[in-house]
Every structure is written in structure tokens, then in C-alpha cells.
Amino acid sequence: MGAREEDAFSRGKVRCAQGLKGALVKSALAALLAASLFLGAAAGAFMAVRAVRPQPAQAYGLNNQGAKSWTFAEGYTGPGFEEWILVFNPPGAFGSGKDILVKVSLFGNDGFIGTYELPVLMPGQRYSLNINQVAESFGYSGDVSVVAFSALGPDFAPFICERALYFDYKGRVSGGSHLMGYQEAESGQ
């Protein structure tokens, strides 16, 4: 190899090494930026959650075991919507340890629609009730409010109750919502 060729070869190595060094620096900076963005997003999400819920979450009902009645003011059973009431009888260590009978009353824009009785639930059992089917059995479809209540006396054991609502509005918007209902405080609370 002549002096010129060696010099060009050496310059190529230097350029290559400088290019590699530059690429490594750029990669390291990109990784640092990505890590900063991730940590910033995580910190921001944490801050947002703390801003929305400044107190720690608390269980519902007397002694963390539920309530004897639950009210859901908003729901819909028309086309494209599917509403469910989810009932759980907590097991002995977390609930009353008793069998429960839950009845569900539906109310529409013109008032009372009807009442549906769930099967008796032993401690630890759950039940999902399709409100669309219940409303349809009463000849109703549309806006609906629901009251779920313990109906097995004499002491009417508490239970946990939630509402899930799924929708596909005219094929354009789909999604769902999930919530705990309103419960009246037990006396003494």
C-alpha cells in the first residue's frame, strides 16, 4: 500500500470511529431522553391519581362487608346497550357468613317497572344479572334506574353490588362503564 492509500485508509478508520462514537453518543442521549419521558409520565400519572383521589381508597359499608341496599340512578337498556348488575355475597371472614336473597327493582321514566328475585346466594357466591333481559321480561326498554336490596329477613345480610354498562352506539362509539352504587349509611355511621 502506498503512503497515499495508507493515509486515506487511516482517515477512513478515524471517520468511522468518529461516526461510531457519534452514533453511540446519540443512542445514549436518545435512551436518556426516553427514560426521562417515561419517568416523567409515570410521575405525572402518579401525581394525577393523587390529585383525583387525595385520600386512600376505602371499603364500602358496615365493617367492610357491603350494604343491605344499593341504588343505581342511571342505566339504559335500549338498542346497542347492555346493562348488568353484579352481586357478591362475601364469605364469612369478610361478610355476614349468611345466605342472602337479593331482589332487584327497576324504575323507568314513568316509575316502577317490576322486581326480579335472584336465587339465594351462599357466602362466597356471586351472580350476574342481565338488566336488559329483566326489563324485556316486563315489556320495557330504555332509561332505567335499579335498586338492589337484601330480602331475606329477619336481619337482611349486607352484600356487594356493582353495575356494568357496555355500549356500541350505532357502530360509531363503543365502550363501557363500571361503578358501585349509592348505599345508605347504616345507623350509627
Image (spheres, rainbow, N blue to C red):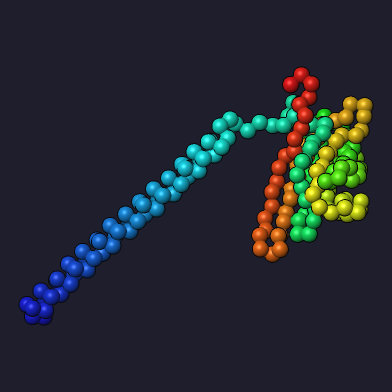
- What residue is rendered at 69% in x and 49% in y? 177
Q: Quadrant of the rendered structure where residue 78 is?
A: bottom right
Work out whether 61 lies above or below 84: above
The answer to whether any part of residue 64 appears in the image is yes
Quarter of the image with the N terminus is bottom left
Q: Residue at x 15, y 75 (%)?
A: 9
Q: Residue 119, can we see it?
A: no
**Residue that protrudes farthest toward the top in the picture:** 188
Q: Is residue 169 above or below residue 63?
A: below
x and y, in percent, of residue 167 in the image: 72, 56
68 over 118 or under it: above or below:
above
Q: Is residue 51 left or right of residue 120?
A: left
Comparing 28 with 82, the one in front is 82
Left or right of 57: which side holds 125?
A: right
Quadrant where the C terminus sits is: top right
The percent position of residue 98, horizontal first and vertical second, equals 87, 32
Q: Nearer the viewer, residue 159 or 3?
A: 159
Instruction: Tell me where residue 4 sits by quadrant.
Output: bottom left
Residue 110 falls in image quadrant: top right
As rendered, which of 163 and 113 lies closer to the eye?
113
Q: Residue at x 82, y 42 (%)?
A: 146
Seen at 53% across and 36% down, the residue is: 51
Spot the residue most to the left: 3
Front in this rendered view, residue 75 or 61: 75
> Horizontal and vertical percent for residue 128?
81, 48
| Extreme residue in the front direction | 110
Measured from the top left, where is residue 28 in percent x and y? Answer: 32, 55
